[in-house]
Image (tube, helix red, strand yellow):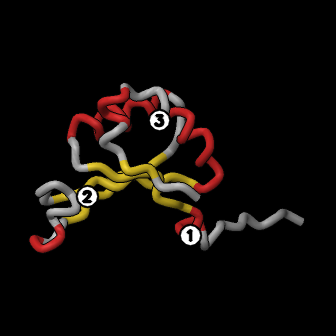
Amino acid sequence: MKKKLSFDKTAYKKSIVLCETTNTRAVKLTSQVLIDHSISFSKAYRHVPLFRRDKYRGASEVCIFSINRNEYTKARAAIRELPDTYLSRLVVNAI
C-alpha cells in the first residue's frame, strides 16, 4: 500500500517576524545576507499611516522580514554580519 503524501496546512503559522526597517539600503543588504546563508524569508511592505510616521522618522512604508521559526537563531547570527550603520537601522524582534 502506497503512503499518501500529507501537506502541512499550518505552514503559514510557523513564520515569525525577524526584523523591520525603513532604510532601502538596509533592506537590500539584509536580503543579500539571508540569501548568502540560505535562509528562506519573505519581505512585505506595510504602509504607515500619517499619524504614526513620527515613530518611523517620517517614513511612509516599512519593510518587514519574516522567516521560518526553526531558522531564527541562524538568521540572527547572519544579521550580525551586517555593518553597524545598517544593523542599527534594523528593529530586530526577540522571541
Vertical relation: 66 (above or below) 4: above
Crowd tier of the residue under label 2, counting other residues whose Cα lies within 10 Å: few below 14, some 14–19, many 20 or above:
few
Q: Which residue is mark 2?
A: 45
- Give the amino acid at mark 3: Ile
On residue 32, the disc is none
Q: Is residue 58 left or right of residue 43?
A: left
Residue holding disc 1: 13
**First in sequence: mark 1 vs mark 2:** 1
Which residue is pictured at 52% across the width and 33% down the height?
Answer: 78
Task: Tell me the distance, in whole angstroms, between the alpha carbons under discs 3 and 1.
Answer: 23 Å
Number of residue marks: 3
Alpha carbon separation for disc pair 1 and 2: 19 Å
Quadrant of the snapshot with the C terminus: bottom right
Residue 77 to residue 10: above or below: above
Dot 2 amino acid type: Tyr
- In terms of secondary structure, where does tag 1 sit? helix
Whether residues under marks 2 and 3 lie with C-beta atoms below 8 angstroms apart, the answer is: no
| Residue annotated with mark 3 | 79
Q: Residue at x 43, y 30 (%)?
A: 33
